[in-house]
Amino acid sequence: MAKTVALSRKVLYDEFDLSSDHNKVSLVLSQAAPDKTVYGSTSMARAPGLKSFEVNHQGYYESGVGEIETVFNANLGTDGTILTLLPTGTEGEPAYSFQGVTLDYQWGGQIGDMNAISGNTKGEGTLVVRGTLMVAGSKTTSGNGTARQLGAVSATQSLYGIIHCPVHAAAGSTITVKIQSDTAEGFPSPTDVLSFTQLTDVGVQWATPIAGAITDEWWRVVWAVTGSPAATIYVNAAIL
């Protein structure tokens, strides 16, 4: 994959798409290194410890329903916020999803400058799911996503699925989304492996992981709509 300039980032925060509110976002992954040095050592020795992550947000202040200041304020100190960061929001690219808690946000600025806002979201004991963006965009009719060879799920792994739906023209319409597997790219005999709860409005879901072993190597997302939902969905699938 070619090197790119950071002209576009997708920032999904629960059921909100805050991409256009940000001008900088960074995901910091780290692992503690507790000291295990003993007598007789000639240099420091360390062991791989607990993993952690945090997301640093930076952008421009805007208040109102679904806007960044309102979202940060409502979620300050709330456990279980689901975030997904994407390089551009293009299907097939890496997707990073995690559950965290926003512990601080700030806004303000000097006279004559843009009114800025910044925040910080930290992990709360859950892993970062680095998967593949299987589906992205508005769905008005039922359909199937692109088949992708993510590989088999071993007996020690699980299939993870995360969905964000920041736009949904509710009014009685629904969209039902599933992740399927099969033995071949053409999906001659697809199996429903993971099903999200039917969406009747905007929302976000971190589905219960499906444990292996699953020998199928090909995966896709399928969706069924009723009414005219015009639902925008982003689905991250990962085998970890």
Image (cartoon, helix red, strand yellow):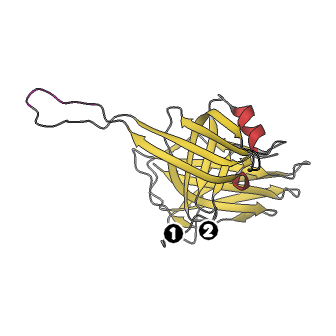
Relative to the observer, which residue lies in front, 46 or 106?
106
* Secondary element at image label 2: loop
Mark 2 vs 1, N-terminal side? 2
Q: Residue at x 49, y 32 (%)?
A: 125
- Distance, label 2 to label 1, CA atoms, is 13 Å
Question: From the viewer's perspective, is 27 left or right of 36?
Answer: right
Residue furthest out toward the front: 111
Residue 199 is situated, as x and y percent measured from the top left of the image, at 77, 46
Residue 36 on the magenta span:
yes
Q: Residues within 10 Å of mark 1 (few under 14, many from 20)?
A: some
Residue 132 is marked as none
Question: Closest to the observer: 189 or 92?
Answer: 92
Q: Which residues are magenta?
A: 35-40
Label 1 secondary element: loop
Can residue 193 be seen here?
no
Q: Residue furthest left?
A: 40
Q: Residue at x 25, y 30 (%)?
A: 35
- Place of residue 76 in the rendered image (x, y in percent of width and height, measured from the top left): 68, 31
Amino acid at the residue labelled 1: Ala
The reply to whether the C-beta atoms of the residues labelled 2 and 1 are less than 8 Å apart is no
Kindly identify the residue that appears in the image at 77 percent across and 50 percent down.
112
Could you tell me residue 48's position as x and y percent?
30, 38
User: Dominant secondary structure of the magenta stretch?
Assistant: loop
Name the residue carrying label 2. 146
Q: Residue at x 87, y 53 (%)?
A: 169
Disc 2 crowd, CA 10 A, few/some/many (<14, 14-19, 20+): some
Instruction: Identify which residue, 131 or 109, lies in the foreground.
Output: 109
Q: Please name the amino acid that badge 2 sits on.
A: Thr
As drawn, is 192 to the left or to the right of 54? right
Q: Which mark is residue 184?
A: 1
Q: Nearer the viewer, mark 2 or mark 1?
A: 2
Q: Is residue 34 above or below residue 223?
A: above
